[in-house]
Image: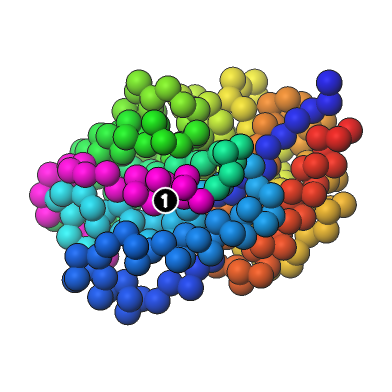
Amino acid sequence: MSHQVKTTVIGSYPTTINPLDLINAYFSQETPVSWQPMILEVVSDMIQAGIDIITDGQTRDPFIQLFTRKLAGCRVRARTEVIDKIEHIAPITLMDQLYLRSLIPKEMMIKGVLTGPYTLACSCVDMFYHDQQQMAIDFAYALHKEASVLQDHVDIISIDEPFFSQSMPEYAYDLIKIITNGISIPVVLHVCGDISGIVDKIIELPVDILSHEFKASPQLMTVFSEYSFSQKLCFGSVRSDDPTIESVDDITRHISKGIELFEDKIIHIAPDCGQRLLPRDNALKKLINLTVAGEQINAR
Ligand SMILES: [Zn+2]
């Protein structure tokens, strides 16, 4: 049988979010309804492109505040300040996932996205723990609770840890283990950037799928091929940092190169990273070409 890949996206998608609306909503006990038009916009693009596994586009808030705004112990100002013990007191992203589910055809799958505990810890001002490791561990326990709630409503969960590519802590394994403990749906770890120097550590982490920027950092193919690893791959196939729309041929060639090296380990193809910073039209066209390339790969 020919090799089959599914198309997916990483976290964020361009939105028409207005910072003033955000502030007003925050002070007026916002209702989920105010976010629904933006989710609808994102989903209509993903449906139009024919993506198999979609996200809500993280429309509600930038990816740090999206979580810290709803966690006890966090106070959101220009940056989030941690002023007390971090605790998960109510679902954070669940409402958006339920709304998303109500919009999409049955066969489409949903990826719930969690901003990783290390990335959260590196992005907050610690006024309580005075210990980055302990703060990251408490973020991880909070995210575990969110993952436990989400797993009944989404098909797959992604932990996004962009900060691992800048400095990977010795306790990275513990953080990921805390989140995934007892989670029964597949878990992805997404780390963007050039992770060539930490691939040996990344492949030790207890997740099912590794998601990286193979398009912007094609040298990762060489590095990964030097190791044997148990995880499947989500293969970055179009750039997120460059609005140029890759041709279907270009994308197909790139994926074929990956499949030569990694064979059926490549189960997902995606943009390298979240597409938030691209013009919406370019983001959509990249997804359309990605889907066509995926269809060509699957038809071989
Ligand atoms: Zn990324």
**Looking at the image, can residue 62 be seen?**
no
What sort of colour scheme is used for the picture?
Answer: rainbow
**Looking at the image, can residue 185 be seen?**
yes
Label 1: element kind: helix
Residue at point 72% right, 34% down? 5
Q: Nearer the viewer, residue 283 or 44?
A: 44
Tell me which amino acid carries mark 1.
Tyr
Q: Going by the image, does 251 lie left or right of 70?
A: right
Residue 257 pos. (x, y %)? 82, 38
Q: Quadrant of residue 298?
A: top right
Q: Is residue 289 above or below residue 131?
A: below
Residue 209 pos. (x, y %)? 56, 31
In the rendered picture of this protein, how many numbered marks are placed on residues? 1
Q: Nearer the viewer, residue 222 or 149?
A: 149
The residue singled out by tag 1 in the image is 99
Residue at point 12% right, 44% down? 85
Label 1 packing within 10 angstroms: few (<14), some (14-19), many (20+): some
Q: Going by the image, does 8 lie left or right of 255?
A: left
Residue 88 magenta-highlighted: yes
Q: Quadrant of residue 254?
A: top right
Residue 279 pos. (x, y %)? 61, 72
Residue 266 pos. (x, y %)? 69, 32
Residue 177 magenta-highlighted: no
Q: Going by the image, does 6 lie left or right of 197?
A: right
Residue at point 63% right, 53% down? 47
Where the C terminus falls, by quadrant?
top right
Residue range of the region highlighted in magenta in the rendering: 78-103
| Residue labelled 1 has its Cβ within 8 Å of some atom of ligand 1 | no
Q: Is residue 133 above or below residue 203?
A: below
Q: Quadrant of residue 184?
A: top left
Residue at point 83% right, 21% down? 1
